[in-house]
Amino acid sequence: MSSHPIRIQVEPRYLPDQSSPEDRVYTFAYTITMTNEGTAAAQLISRHWLINDSAGHTQEVKGLGVIGQQPLLAPGQSFRYTSGCRLQAPSGTMHGSYFFVTEGGDRFDVAIPMFVLEADTGAAPVSRVLH
């Protein structure tokens, strides 16, 4: 079968109001937009994340769906959600994969490209968009 063109876009942001740097708690939100650019409908079944912080801690997250959902994406359709994570250091990275199944039964993984989580410790909030 040909490649399965699910496009992933990530928009991370630091949440200073939910963080406590003096306690080594840095909270981030990330918004994911997944778009089915293929010709067959595909359903997201599960996720796998690797979260690393600059202090050397690694978290692995596996589970069914995202935010309690397993969206079915028709060709051309997008699904957008926001989730979050906490680090023990002001910066880190996340990457992973989503597991999909097409209506025809084909199974495939879609890589989630690595993105940077960076706490803005200055006065003004900073928003970064990575594609």
Image: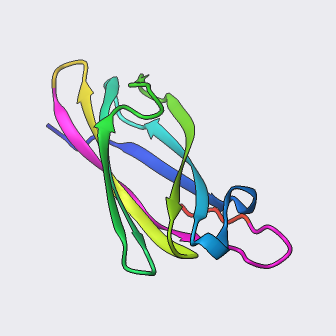
Q: Is residue 92 above or below residue 85?
A: below
Residue 11 image point, x, y percent: 60, 55
How was the colour assigned to the protein in this rendering?
rainbow
> Where, by quadrant of the figure, is residue 38 drawn?
top left
60, 49: nearer the viewer: 60
Residue beneath the point at 34% across and 61% down = 59
In the figure, is residue 96 to the left or right of 68? left
Screen quadrant of the N terminus: top left
The residue most toward the top is 103
In the figure, is residue 63 to the left or right of 89? left
128, 106: nearer the viewer: 128
Magenta stretch: includes residue 66:
no
Residue 30 image point, x, y percent: 57, 52
Q: Identify the magenta region.
A: 106-126
Q: Is residue 57 above or below residue 31?
A: below
Residue 29 image point, x, y percent: 60, 53
Residue beneath the point at 65% across and 60% down = 13
Q: How many marks?
A: 0
Residue 49 image point, x, y percent: 34, 53
Residue beneath the point at 43% across and 34% down = 66
